Image (cartoon, grey):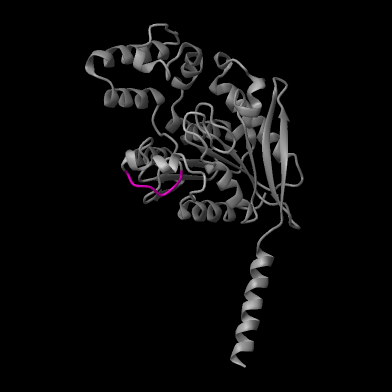
Amino acid sequence: MKSRLAALLLLLCTSLAQAAAPTVLQRPIDLDTGQGVLHGSLLLPQQDSPPPVVLIIAGSGPTDRDGNNPASGRIDNLKRLALLLAGEHIASVRFDKRGVAASQPATPDERDLSVERYVADVVAWGQKLRQDPRFGPLILVGHSEGALIATLAAEDAGASAVITLAGSGRPIGDVLREQLAQRLPPAQLASGEALIARLQAGQTSLDVPPMLRQVFRPSVQPYLITLLRQDPAAAFARLRVPALIVQGRNDVQVEVADAEQLKAAKPDAELVLIDGMNHVLRISPRDMSQQRDSYRNPELPLARELGEHIVAFIQALPAA
């Protein structure tokens, strides 16, 4: 009798688990901006009512829709986030920014990139998704520099909420100066600070110290000029929709103080600090030398609390 009861309970639990796991449609999705086509990936849980849809915005540089960057290799953290959301009945679109991966032909010369252009692209994606009857409320999720882009685009995109993941709360000029002070000898530090000041004044420069040529190469300076104009906390303060700030305590690229600065700018935002989570959203030691595997291994899971807090926040949003 006990064995039959155990078997029935096992069958019931298995059936409930299968019923809870949605069938997910996976399809390419494109956006013709009129200034090039952007390519992305759609994950759409199949259900009776339109699910919330998350637009995932990647971080700085040539980071693709999955979170991968040629400089660091394949880590798939944004792809894993999309899959996690799909399992919780939340649709998502992640896309290659213009000039990156499949969207590289949209802007083949990085001298033509700007923060304003990235923001306009997110607005266009948001409007496309909001007009699609398959989707419910739109949530913008930005990782690292993508958090700033999400913040700036939210109102015009018609977003119902914004989620920042490892987003800076300080102007990029302050961040760059801090990083230079930690890495450059005094003889080169003055040259680096002078270069930042020149860019902040809206002027490009060919006089780039050798150690900084990758970050401040002449072709990327026009983009940096547009980025240096931004104040993430001030932009965040202007948000009129619910917001969630997620920051890892073991992030060596963005500090907990950045997240607290965003929270101070918008006191009604929810702030979540995750013990052990680093910049690529995985649990890792604080020491950067011990974080390398998390930046290179796509098989590593995301921090468990990350998914829990994002899903809970989205599920608590009012219906569109």
Classify residue 94 by image quadrant. top right
Q: Is any atom of residue 162 visible in this view? A: no
Q: Is any atom of residue 108 visible in this view? A: yes
Q: Residue furthest top?
A: 206
- Residue 299 position, x and y percent, is 51, 48
State the residue in front, 37 or 74: 74
In the figure, 4 relative to 264: above or below? below
Quadrant (top left/top right/bottom left/bottom right) for the N terminus: bottom right
Tell me the magenta residue range: 281-286
At x 58%, y 43%, the residue is 79
- Residue 183 position, x and y percent, is 29, 25
Residue 110 is covered by the magenta coloring? no
At x 42%, y 43%, the residue is 293
In the figure, 287 relative to 172: above or below? below
- Residue 316 position, x and y percent, is 57, 55
At x 63%, y 23%, the residue is 104
Residue 59 left/right relative to 214? right
Q: Residue furthest bottom?
A: 1
- Residue 312 position, x and y percent, is 54, 56
At x 70%, y 19%, the residue is 35
Q: Residue furthest left?
A: 186
Q: Main secondary structure of the magenta part?
A: loop
